[in-house]
Amino acid sequence: MSGIVIPPDRTSKQPVRGYCYNPECKPVDHDRFEFVIEDDYFCCPKCKAFKGPMVGSLVLIHLITRDNRGPIEGEGGLRYKIACDSERAYLATFTNLESATTVPDIANCPGCLRVAAEQKLVQSGYLLGVK
C-alpha cells in the first residue's frame, strides 16, 4: 500500500492529525477535512486520497511556557518548557513536523491546550500567566 509516512521522530504522546483538501470531503464550515491518523501510509478515510498535496499530516504546534527550571533555554538565557512534556529539551527537529509557540491561540497540541486550560494560562504580552 502506498501513502504518506508519519515522521519516525514525531512525538507519540499526542495524536497525529491529517488533512484532506478534496472538495468532496470538505465540511461546509471549514476549508479542509481533518482526521486522526492511526498508522503510517495513511489515506483520507473519506475519499481514500493518499498523496500530497491533497492529503498530509498537520504540523503539531506545542505551547511553550516560562519556567525557571525548564529544560529549554531561550533568548537571554530565559528558561521554558513545553506544556505537554515538561522534560522535553527541544522544540522541534527538521523532520518531525512539530513546532512551538508562546501564543495559546496558535497552539494545536491537544496535550498543551489541556494543560493551558487546567492551569488557566492566558496571553499577557509574550508571557503566559494565570487568570
Image: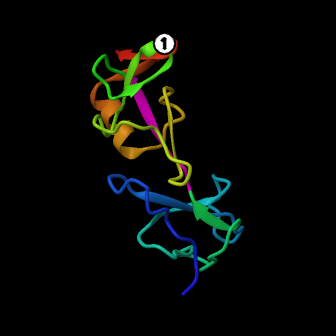
Q: Which residues are magenta?
A: 58-65
**Residue at point 56%, 54% (across, down):** 58
Q: Along the horizontal axis of the image, is 90 left or right of 69?
A: right
Q: Is residue 120 magenta?
A: no
> Farthest residue in the bottom direction?
1
Residue nearest the observer in this picture, 57 or 114: 57
**Residue at point 54%, 34% (across, down):** 106
Quarter holding the N terminus is: bottom right
**Magenta stretch: dominant secondary structure:** strand
Q: Quadrant of residue 118?
A: top left
Picture coordinates of residue 62, whole percent (x, y): 45, 39
Quarter holding the C terminus is: top left
What residue is pinned by disc 1? 76
Rate crowding at label 1 as few (under 14), some (14 to 19) or many (20 or more) other CA atoms within 10 Å. few
Label 1 residue SS: helix
Q: Quadrant of residue 112?
A: top left
**Residue at point 57%, 73% (across, down):** 44
